[in-house]
């Protein structure tokens, strides 16, 4: 059974990484909610993709689009709540890429705990969570260890540790999770070409998450040889979804998870 992950909720239809977007993904029938997190200046774990405010998404209290990507870790949660993230900037390339996304004005960046509350009645839904870090901008987030610990604490507090995986491109954070929360499987993300399965295997990874555009049958064969599971991101076009299914991946993250589900019904 392929794990169908709603990427940032259902980004193709509603504002990414927001409670309305996650609710839509649940309605569509995903098995996993894929999301990203950061930590505010006062230690609140929030759901947000970028390390800082996205200039194509965030509007200030005056209704104007922000002009700079202020890092999340330099804002308190109360300060963060002043920004509206319920609409894409109309003239942006981002907006053109998601023409079906409907605005939900007044939407705020949520706490991770709010998502756990939203899904409390659903004992089957899984979470694939990425703490956003980048080795070229380490000053814009907590260091790997405290970042991982903040996420682990929230997940355990909600009692969903057995339904949570932690993914990252910044692998040192995964090492912390493996050591301190072995009940949460880690997912090694890669982007671009190269010998990704070998690198993941060398790092001790058991789940590999590549960019679907660079995935090949040969790489899948190598990953399977080392006993890896494979989840691909972010697969939106029907032809690409069909290719991923045909190659035998274990999971697919999509901005349009209903497209994946519909194709699986016809397989």
Image (cartoon, rainbow, N blue to C red):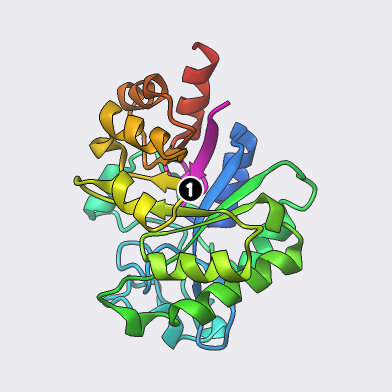
The stretch of residues the image draws in magenta is 1-15
Q: Is residue 165 above or below residue 83?
A: above
Residue occupying image coordinates x 45% and y 26%: 259
Q: Position of residue 219 (x, y in %)?
A: 29, 35
Residue 42, located in which quarter of the rendered image?
A: bottom right
Residue 208 in the figure: left or right of residue 149: left
Q: Position of residue 246 (x, y in %)?
A: 38, 19
The stretch drawn in magenta includes residue 250: no
Quick one: label 1, few (<14), some, or many (20+) residues within 10 Å?
some
The stretch drawn in magenta includes residue 11: yes
Element on which disc 1 rests:
loop
Relative depth, front residue between 49 and 13? 49
Q: Quadrant of the N terminus?
A: top right
Q: Which residue is mark 1?
A: 206
Q: Is residue 20 above or below residue 117?
A: above
Q: Position of residue 146 (x, y in %)?
A: 53, 81
Residue occupying image coordinates x 31% and y 62%: 56
Relative depth, front residue between 265 and 97? 265
């Amino acid at each position: 059974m392929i794990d169908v992950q709603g990427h940032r909720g259902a980004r193709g239809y509603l504002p990414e990484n927001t409670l309305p977007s996650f609710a839509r993904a649940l309605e569509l029938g995903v098995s996993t909610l894929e999301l990203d997190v950061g930590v505010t200046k006062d230690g609140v774990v929030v759901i947000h993709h970028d390390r800082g405010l996205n200039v194509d998404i965030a509007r200030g209290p005056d209704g104007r689009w922000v002009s700079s990507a202020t890092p999340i870790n330099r804002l308190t949660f109360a300060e963060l709540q002043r920004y509206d993230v319920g609409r894409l900037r109309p003239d942006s390339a981002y907006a053109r890429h998601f023409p079906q996304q409907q605005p939900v004005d007044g939407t705020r960046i949520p706490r991770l705990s709010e998502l756990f509350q939203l899904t409390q009645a659903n004992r089957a839904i899984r979470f694939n969570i990425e703490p956003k870090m980048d080795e070229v901008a380490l000053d814009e987030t907590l260091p790997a260890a405290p970042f991982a610990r903040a996420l682990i604490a929230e997940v355990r507090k909600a009692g969903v540790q057995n339904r949570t995986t932690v993914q990252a491109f910044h692998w040192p954070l995964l090492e912390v999770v493996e050591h301190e929360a072995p009940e949460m499987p880690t997912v090694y993300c890669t982007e671009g070409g190269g010998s990704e399965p070998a690198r993941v295997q060398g790092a001790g990874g058991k789940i590999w998450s590549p960019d679907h555009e660079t995935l090949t049958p040969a790489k899948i064969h190598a990953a399977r040889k080392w006993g890896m599971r494979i989840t691909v991101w972010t697969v939106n076009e029907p032809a690409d979804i069909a290719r991923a299914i045909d190659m035998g991946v274990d999971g697919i993250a999509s901005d349009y998870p209903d497209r994946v589900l519909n194709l699986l019904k016809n397989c």
